[in-house]
Structure formats: C-alpha cells, structure tokens
Image (cartoon, rainbow, N blue to C red):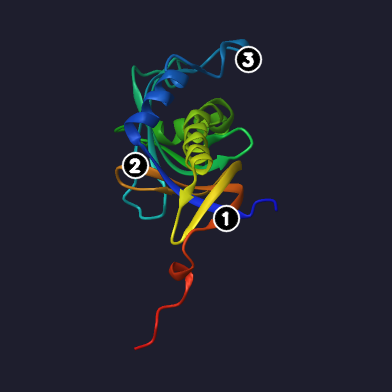
Amino acid sequence: MEDSVRIYVPVSISYPALQGVLKNQLIGKYIPEQEAGDPYAQILDVGISGSSSGSNQVILRIRIRILRTMLKRDNVDLYVLATLGYDNTAQQLYVQQFHLTSRTNSTLFNTGLEVLVNKVAYNQIMSKARVNLKHIISGELQKANGMLQEGLQLKGIKLLGTVNEVRVQDITPLPDKVTLSVELKADVEAQVLDLTELLPAKQV
C-alpha cells in the first residue's frame, strides 16, 4: 500500500540561522549585477526578524550603498515586509510576496529610491534570498526512517516501514523563529502487539 501513513513533524528555524545564510548569499552583490550593466547599488548587510503585523510575515533589512550620482548616498536601509513560500521541488524557502520601503530623512529620495529598487527588487534581490533547507529536510527523513526501521511503537501497534516523500505543508513566521509543518509520507506495515490497547474504554 502506497503512502499508508502520513506523519506531521514541526520543524523550527531561528532567525539568526536564516540570517547567516542570507548574509553569505547577498552581501557584496551589485544591483543590477555588473555583467548586466553599470550597477547603481551594492548590498552591504542583511538582517531578518519576525514582524509584529500579525499576518505571518517577516521583515528583511537590506543595507545598500548607492553608487549612482543622481541618488548617491553612503548607506541606505531598505525594509522589506515579506511573505514566505516554500519550493518543495528545490527544497528552498523563498520570498513569495513583498513590499519594500526606504527610510531616510528625505521623502523625495525615499520615493525615488523605492520606485527604482522595486522595479528590480525581485529579480536582483529577492530571487537570491532563497534558503536551501535540503540538509534540514534530509535530517528529518533520516530520523523518521531510523524510527520506522527499528519499529515505531504506538498504542498497541508497532509500525515498520520507510518514508518515501517529504513535503512542507505550512510556513508560520513567529516572533523568534519560523516554523515549518513537514509531512512525511511512508509505506508501513503494522504489527498489533496488544489488542486490549485498541479496544474502546469500558463504559462504567
């Protein structure tokens, strides 16, 4: 019988862990990339935290250096309110939707920069802000297979088998971490160890 059992496992990832990956992938990148033409900005730093908006979003802070003369400034912080998605094929966490704002003391500068950056933000920044979770998902798969190979004992039953598919079903950003609901699909056989455990409780 295929996929006879589905097991749901909560997996938590801290924001510092996500931030470390994003820093490695984004710091030093040019917008647009130098191969595509004369860049107008360079990414200096990246941060990520939970949002207080209560709408399952995270906040990305991207510090950039403006290189073009018209908007030239030393450093500018961009704030991205982002909704996360998950690509089960690539096993990557990514930015699904976002709204980007700039915060300086110049309204005109903020407006100009936001229009400019939003035009290329997804292709040049957000498309690179993907976190590969393959090693985490593989770890959950190995743990689940280890339990099923030895025999997972539940109430009066022992399950033996192999997990053959892992999928992330839900993503929940929290104030201090991101929680994933991971579904493990397994082919198993059940050995009944104690029938009395399976019987309904006696009515008094």
Of the image marks 3 and 2, the number of the one nearer the N terminus = 3
Residue 91, placed above or below residue 170: above
Type of residue at label 1? Ala
Q: Mark 1 = which residue?
A: 190
Residue 109, placed above or below residue 148: above
| Discs 3/2, front | 2
| Discs 1/3, front | 1
Of the image marks 1 and 3, the number of the one nearer the N terminus = 3
Task: Judge the density around disc 2: few (<14), some (14-19), many (≥20) Cα neighbours within 10 Å.
Answer: some
Asked whether disc 1 touches disc 3, contact meaning CB atoms under 8 Å apart, the reply is: no
Relative placement, left or right, of 74 versus 11 is left
Of the image marks 1 and 2, the number of the one nearer the N terminus = 2
The residue closer to the viewer here, 80 or 87, is: 87
Residue 144 in the image, given as x and y percentages of width and height: 49, 41
Relative placement, left or right, of 183 versus 200 is right
Q: In the figure, residue 161 lies in which quadrant?
A: top right
Residue 11, placed above or below residue 105: below
Q: CA distance from mark 1 to mark 3?
A: 58 Å
Asked whether residue 80 appears in the rendered view, the answer is: yes
Asked whether disc 1 touches disc 2, contact meaning CB atoms under 8 Å apart, the reply is: no
Q: In the figure, residue 62 lies in which quadrant?
A: top left
Q: Residue, x 55% and y 25% (percent of image)? A: 124
